Every structure is written in structure tokens, then in C-alpha cells.
Image (cartoon, grey):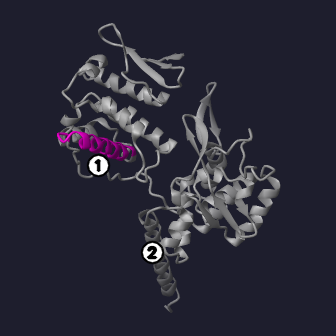
């Protein structure tokens, strides 16, 4: 076991790889969490919640909270682990590793520390609304909406076993107002970004934009996935980071397994990249790290410019990688995933049908692809306005 001390509480990594959290309570005893955590961050979140209880004068030993018995209706903390272990996707297949990790994180940080000891039959609309408004951080609206949706899903499953459990609905809780609104890059901005990337990473940016590929799909591309004769890239796998390690899996959805046509103007760039930067052999990675593994998002993204103090001196550090390229393009707001958004809007602007967009993007439902058609129509209105301005400037005085 590996233990680490903190200003409040103590963390211990068990031989299984999971984390245990505990702290010295006001009664002088050490109190441990009634469950272990998948990651250190989750364990730290539990400690933070316990500290909040202590500071708010609402503390009760966690062991006593966990020992409270209720007739037939178990607490959420007692029911949730079993539900997660047996839960399946809508098509009956097991949850993907990344999804399971996400659910465990939501449970460990946002749900169980606040509602875990509450009997499920007592989790009503008032309890959920108070949890959603008072216990969840206001600056993470998307994660909060995910937590609410997960809680509802668990309570629905419990209601199938016990009719006295009624999953409450809180209006607006499932609809998050995202802080970041993806604004697609213009062709000029995209060209500037690409030209200012390291040469070995330029094709990654091009494939994420012009072919609208996800980063995980790009990072797992291998030489055998590029068909120059048909001018297509075959998306068959993706790489994700789970439990601090890279795992090769299938694409995000079944529709994600697809062949994407490469725009002809990119073919010379693809040929050049294959000859200069791709690992040898059919299994050779298109974008390998220095250690020979799949490229990580942090390596491609680089670091933003910043000022920091080193040995008493203020030092200006220049941006690197994609962060540097987007600053030069005048788009410091642009994220790597926004490149896929850019490619989707570009495809929609060509007049692609909804079905064609779904196939190219690997979407299994029309809802997501519809966003890009709307964005394309919005852009068309901008173009029309610019044409009118042009006409007005050409009018005789």
C-alpha cells in the first residue's frame, strides 16, 4: 500500500489499485470512507465533502451513517455499486471502460458523499433539488447534469424492484448550459493553425478537422487504416485513457466504425506523412509518441503561454503545440475537439444530407448531426449578410 498525507485527511492506495480515504475526526478517532475509490481524485473529493460537513457543524461519523438500517429499502450507497456492476447499454452490451470510469467518478465525487446514506425511498424532489442546487459546484454545469441523469437512472432501476421508490424529476437539471460554445474555425484560421504545428502533427490536425475524426480515433490510426487507392481512412478502433493507462477499444458508438473519404487535397500530405513519420509495417502508428505509444492529447495540445515564478524570478513561458498555433491564428478559445466541430460544419455546408453527416461523423442518432446542419444554416445567413454589405458598398454615391 502507498499512503500520502495531506493538510486534511489521509489517502492510501491499496494493492488493488483503488484508493482509501480517511481522516482524524473531532472525536479523536480515525474515520475511513465506507467504500474505496477508483482514482485519487475521487478519494480527494470524498475528503473535501467530509471537511465541508465538519466546517458546517453537521458532521456524523461516516461509519454511523453507513450503519443506519432501513426496512427493505437500502441506501443509495448500498444499491449503486451492484447496479453499476450489472448495468448494460441500451443494446445489451457491457458499458465501455471510459463510461464506467465516468459513472464511478460521478458517484464517488458528486452523488454518494451527499446522498449515499439516504434511503432511496426518501430521495424525493425536495431532497434532489436541494442536492442539485446546494451541494454541486455551480461552475461544472455539464458534470452536474450528468450526475443528475445518473441518479435518475439508478433510482429508476431501484423502482422496478420496490414500487415505493419514485424517481423524482427536477425541471432543468438534465439540461446543462455549457460554458464553452464551440465556434468553428474559418478556413484561414485552420490554415494558420496547421502551418504552425510541428510537421509530424500537422496531419492529425487535418484529419480531425477535414475528416471530423475524434482525437481517440486519430491517435489509434495505423498504416493499415489508410487506403490511398480508395482515398479513405478506415476507423475501426479508438484509444482512451482509463485508470491512468491507455486502452484500445472500439469507437464511441457502433456507428463509429466507418470509412471516411479523405478530401483529395489532403492526399499529398498523407503520402508525405506516411513516408516520413509513420512507424513501419501495417501495425505502425500514424502518430506515435517518443516512447512509441499512441500520441497523447496533452502532447498534441501543448501548453498555453503563461507567467510563473522560478527561483524568485518571473519567467514568461511561450505556448507550445496546438496552444501556440491557435494563439497565432487569433483563436485562443479553440479546443482540439472543436476541430471535429469545424469539419462537421464544413461537411454540412457542402449540402450533405442528415444521413450522410451521420455516416461521416459516426453518429448513431440524428440529434447530434442535426446540430451541424443548423450551424451550417446559421453560417449561410452570415454569408448572405456579407453579400448584401458588398452590394451596398458597390452602389454609386
Question: Which residue sits at x=78%, y=63%?
Answer: 271
Q: Quick check: 358 left or right of 65?
A: right
Residue 25's spot in the image, x, y percent?
A: 33, 13
- Give residue 359's position: percent from left, percent from top: 54, 67
For residue 78, above or below residue 266: above
Q: Residues within 10 Å of mark 2 (few under 14, many from 20)?
A: some
Can you see residue 362?
Answer: yes
Of all residues, the one furthest to the top in this rendering is: 28
Q: Which residue is mark 1?
A: 173
Asked whether residue 152 is drawn in magenta, I would say: yes
Question: Viewer-proximal residue, 138 or 167?
Answer: 167
Residue 106 visible within the image: no
Outermost residue toward the bottom in this view: 396
Picture layout, residue 377 above or below residue 116: below
Q: Is residue 300 left or right of residue 58?
A: right
The residues tagged by marks 2 and 1 sit, at their Cα atoms, a distance apart of 29 Å
Kindly identify which residue carries mark 2: 377
For the stretch drawn in magenta, what is the main secondary structure?
helix
Task: Name the mark nearer the viewer: 2 or 1.
Answer: 1
Q: Earlier in the sequence, mark 2 or mark 1?
A: 1
Q: Over which residues does the magenta segment extend? A: 143-165
Say what secondary structure mark 1 lies in: loop
Query: Residue sitting at 50 percent across and 90 percent down?
Result: 395
Q: Quadrant of the N terminus?
A: top right
Q: Is residue 268 magenta?
A: no
- Image position, residue 210 (x, y; %): 62, 65
Q: Splitting the image into 4 quarters, where does residue 9 fall?
A: top left
Residue 202 percent across, percent down from the top left? 70, 56
Amino acid at each position: 500500500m502507498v499512503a500520502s498525507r495531506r493538510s486534511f485527511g489521509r489517502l492510501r492506495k491499496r494493492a488493488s489499485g483503488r484508493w482509501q480515504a480517511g481522516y482524524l475526526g473531532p472525536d479523536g478517532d480515525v474515520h475511513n470512507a465506507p467504500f474505496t475509490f477508483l482514482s485519487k481524485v475521487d478519494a480527494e473529493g470524498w475528503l473535501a465533502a467530509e471537511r465541508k460537513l465538519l466546517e458546517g457543524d453537521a458532521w456524523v461519523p461516516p461509519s454511523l451513517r453507513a450503519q443506519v438500517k432501513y426496512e427493505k429499502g437500502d441506501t443509495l450507497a448500498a444499491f449503486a455499486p451492484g447496479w453499476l456492476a450489472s448495468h448494460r447499454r441500451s443494446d445489451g452490451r457491457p458499458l465501455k471502460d471510459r463510461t464506467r470510469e465516468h459513472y464511478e467518478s460521478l458517484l464517488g465525487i458528486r452523488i454518494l458523499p451527499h446522498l449515499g446514506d439516504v434511503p432511496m425511498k426518501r430521495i424525493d424532489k425536495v431532497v434532489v433539488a436541494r442536492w442539485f442546487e446546494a451541494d454541486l459546484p455551480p461552475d461544472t454545469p455539464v458534470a452536474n447534469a450528468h450526475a443528475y441523469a445518473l441518479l435518475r437512472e439508478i433510482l429508476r432501476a431501484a423502482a422496478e424492484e420496490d414500487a415505493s421508490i419514485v424517481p423524482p424529476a427536477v425541471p432543468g437539471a438534465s439540461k446543462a448550459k455549457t460554458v464553452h460554445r464551440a465556434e468553428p474555425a474559418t478556413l484561414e484560421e485552420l490554415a494558420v493553425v496547421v502551418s504552425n504545428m510541428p510537421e509530424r502533427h500537422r496531419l492529425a490536425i487535418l484529419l480531425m478537422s477535414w475528416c471530423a475524426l475524434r482525437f481517440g480515433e486519430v491517435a489509434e490510426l495505423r498504416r493499415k487504416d489508410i487506403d490511398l487507392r480508395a482515398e479513405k481512412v478506415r476507423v475501426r478502433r479508438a484509444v482512451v485513457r482509463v485508470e491512468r493507462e491507455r486502452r484500445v477499444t472500439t469507437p464511441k458508438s457502433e456507428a463509429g466504425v466507418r470509412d471516411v473519404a479523405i478530401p483529395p487535397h489532403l492526399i499529398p500530405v498523407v503520402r508525405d506523412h506516411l513516408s516520413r513519420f509513420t512507424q513501419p509495417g501495417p501495425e505502425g502508428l500514424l502518430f506515435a509518441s517518443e516512447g512509441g505509444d499512441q500520441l497523447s492529447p496533452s502532447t498534441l495540445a501543448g501548453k498555453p503561454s503563461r507567467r510563473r515564478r522560478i527561483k524568485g524570478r518571473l519567467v514568461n513561458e511561450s505556448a507550445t503545440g496546438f496552444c501556440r498555433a491557435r494563439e497565432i491564428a487569433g483563436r485562443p478559445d479553440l479546443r482540439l475537439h472543436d476541430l471535429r466541430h469545424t469539419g462537421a460544419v464544413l461537411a454540412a455546408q457542402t449540402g450533405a444530407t442528415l444521413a450522410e453527416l451521420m455516416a461521416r461523423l459516426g453518429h448513431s442518432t440524428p440529434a447530434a448531426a442535426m446540430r451541424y446542419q443548423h450551424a451550417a444554416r446559421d453560417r449561410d445567413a452570415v454569408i448572405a449578410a456579407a453579400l448584401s454589405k458588398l452590394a451596398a458598398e458597390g452602389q454609386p454615391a
